[in-house]
Amino acid sequence: MDHPNRRRVLLAATGLGAAALLAQFAARPASATPDTAKALLQSLAKGEPKEGRITIKAPEIAENGNAVPVTVSVDSPMTDKDYVKAIHVVSDGNPAPGVASFMLTPLSGKAEVQLRVRMASTQKIIALAEMSDGSLWTLAREVKVTIGGCGG
Amino acid sequence: MADDIKPRIRVPASPKKGEVIEVKTLITHIMETGQRKDAAGAVIPRKIVNSMSVTYNGKPVFEARLEPAISANPYLSFHLRVDEPGTLLFTWKDDDGAEYKAEQKITLA
């Protein structure tokens, strides 16, 4: 029953498993993932976002990840009845997924914000717009980064 | 370091009543992420400006919550419809509890 060969195989298998697990733990604090970015957006605004109504302006290739200019605009009339309440921005390749959240009012007149983002590596920047009627809109855009901006 | 923190605001000179203007803001700040280590290998503690709120004649018009992923010397721009002349009041909040304020008058054409 206790076949030495079988035993060795089993041992090797558990060893491999443990190594994989360790690797995963080691990797975790280093980076946000598409999943953690999505989870963060879910916690910021509950509901199922539809794709569209957002435009993200950002360089296709950013040479310096320390300050990547990003413009997010949302298609909305910005009247008292129909306006953008909030714009949330996250990204999926930095140590943490959060970037910024902006609260707007009908007085904004135009739903457009501009910011500068640190990017550790090539990654997707994801914007989510929360409208006054409760609907959610989202869009993702990839920015290629040649020199990362996390100082490490 | 705290002495270096200086807000800058830029708005169009004299907008017409009802015009939508772009308000550009920048505050000089290190925005230390809390991810970096010093020469001895110790983590440099996080110190960022974590929010900016703006009122126009006392009414809240814009608010931003910032994370360490925002660049040093955070630049932000947003839009505002000016129906009346008035004063924009900007407040940035630092992780260490400090508040930085700036004012900008807007006169209509």
Image (cartoon, rainbow, N blue to C red):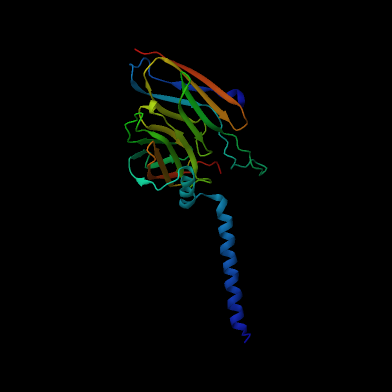
Q: Which residue lies furthest to the bottom in this view?
A: A1
- The residue that appears at 49% across and 18% down in the rendered structure is B103
Above or below, B109 relative to A131: above
x%, y% of residue A22?
59, 61
Q: Quadrant of residue A110?
A: top left
- Position in image of residue A41 (x %, y %): 46, 45
A72 sits to left or right of A24: left
- B16 lies above or below A114: above
Quarter that holds the C terminus of chain B: top left
Can residue A67 be seen?
no
User: Residue B89, can we see it?
Assistant: yes
* Left or right: residue B93 compared with residue A79: right
Quarter of the picture holding the N terminus of chain B:
top right
- Of residues A87 and A3, the one drawn nearer to the viewer in this rendering: A87
Q: Looking at the picture, how far across and down is residue A121, in whole percent?
A: 47, 46
Q: Residue A8, image x and y in percent?
A: 61, 78
Q: Residue at x 50, y 23 (%)?
A: B90
A120 is higher (above) or lower (below) than A5: above
Which quadrant holds residue A137?
top left
Name the foreground residue: A89 vs A119. Answer: A89
In front: A94, or A104? A104
Query: How many marks overall?
Result: 0
Please name the residue shown 61% across and 85% down the image. Answer: A3
